[in-house]
Image (tube, rainbow, N blue to C red):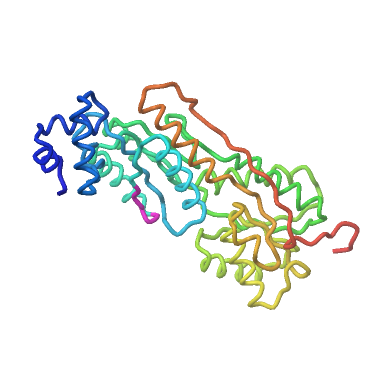
Amino acid sequence: MKTIIDIARAAGVAKSTVSRYLNGGSVSEETREKIERIIKQHNYVPNTFAQSLKAKKTSIIGTIVPRLDSFAVSQTLMGIDEELRERQYQLLISSANQDMNREIEEIYALARQKISGLLLLAAQITEQHLKAIRECRIPVVMIGQQHSLLHSVVHDDFHAGYMMGRHILNKGHRRIAYLGVTEQDIAVGVMRKEGFRKALDEYKDCEVRYYESSFRMNEAVAAAERLLEDWMPTIIVCATDNIALGVMKAAFLKQIPVPSGLSVTGFGGYDVTEIIHPALTTVKYHYKRAGKLAAENIISLVNREPVEMVTVLNCEIVGRESVDNLQGRII
């Protein structure tokens, strides 16, 4: 027994009566008890997904992520899922696999499934993104990036970079490498680096060189090996924890001890950074909180309630063993 029609037949009532009961509508006490008894007897579970597709207003929120094998993405999705479940909404996830064209295609694909709103974790927003959003006519909240035309929940990347810069300077580091990512990613590739650069600009005796990697750990290992062949800084500041782990692997392969031979830092606050040895100095981001706030905001937009265009989350420096203290020492 899998459909409303089956339940209606067994209860001797109209299909519309069962539908009204399932949607919290008014039915007589006798009918309610009869329907409940039959539902329990046959372990009937309403197909809320199908119900949403038939309704004018669905309870489905689509979420497009760049990749699934990411700590930041998984933590953000956990926050989204918790909040949506609590508010009786469903989560529909689509991965773009770091392909921007696929990302845009998924906006249209999710809209065809009659989602009420869209949460978008994108590295950048192009005119094609904006065109798709306009044509689909669904409310959108971005997570992790900011655009003047879209609501967004972002981490304070500029301040995070600034805090990290001040932290390593206070530890006495003056020969510094920064291993970042493409500037097409405004939050990670630009804002973190600019905040870091601002901190270092306040000191006049620093030698800083900037390098670039991808987000993937194996490519970060190769980038770090090239960096260390080019130059030997006292510290490598990495734009993400994944890149930092790649740098630590490269240092191990080159038999450079961390932190006495090379200090390393990251951004993110991934769980693994606390249990590796030496534990990684990083900036902790509150990804789960970002997911919950984004879910709150998209539900408000779906219900046509006012929402701030930008919600900014603070982050915090976590000092650990991977940064050597060079204060008072000749480098």
User: Splitting the image into 4 quarters, where does residue 251 fall?
Assistant: bottom right
Q: Is residue 95 magenta?
A: yes
Q: Position of residue 39 (x, y in %)?
A: 21, 43
Question: Residue at horizontal 53%, vertical 38%?
Answer: 154
279 vs 7, left or right, is right
On screen, 283 above or below 52? below
Residue at 79% across, 57% down: 173
Q: Residue at x 51, y 66 (%)?
A: 219
Quarter placement of the C terminus: bottom right
Residue 46 at x, y percent in the picture? 23, 42
Q: Can residue 19 be found in the magenta stretch?
A: no
- Which range of residues does the magenta coloring cover? 93-98
Residue 157 appears at what percent x and percent y? 60, 42
In the rendered image, which quarter is residue 60 located in? top left
Q: Is residue 78 above or below residue 87?
A: below
Q: Position of residue 49 (x, y in %)?
A: 25, 42
User: Closer to the camera, 198 or 282?
Assistant: 282
Image-based side of 298 in relation to 49, left or right? right
Place residue 280 in its image quadrant: bottom right
Seen from the viewer's position, the closer of residues 21 and 269 is: 21
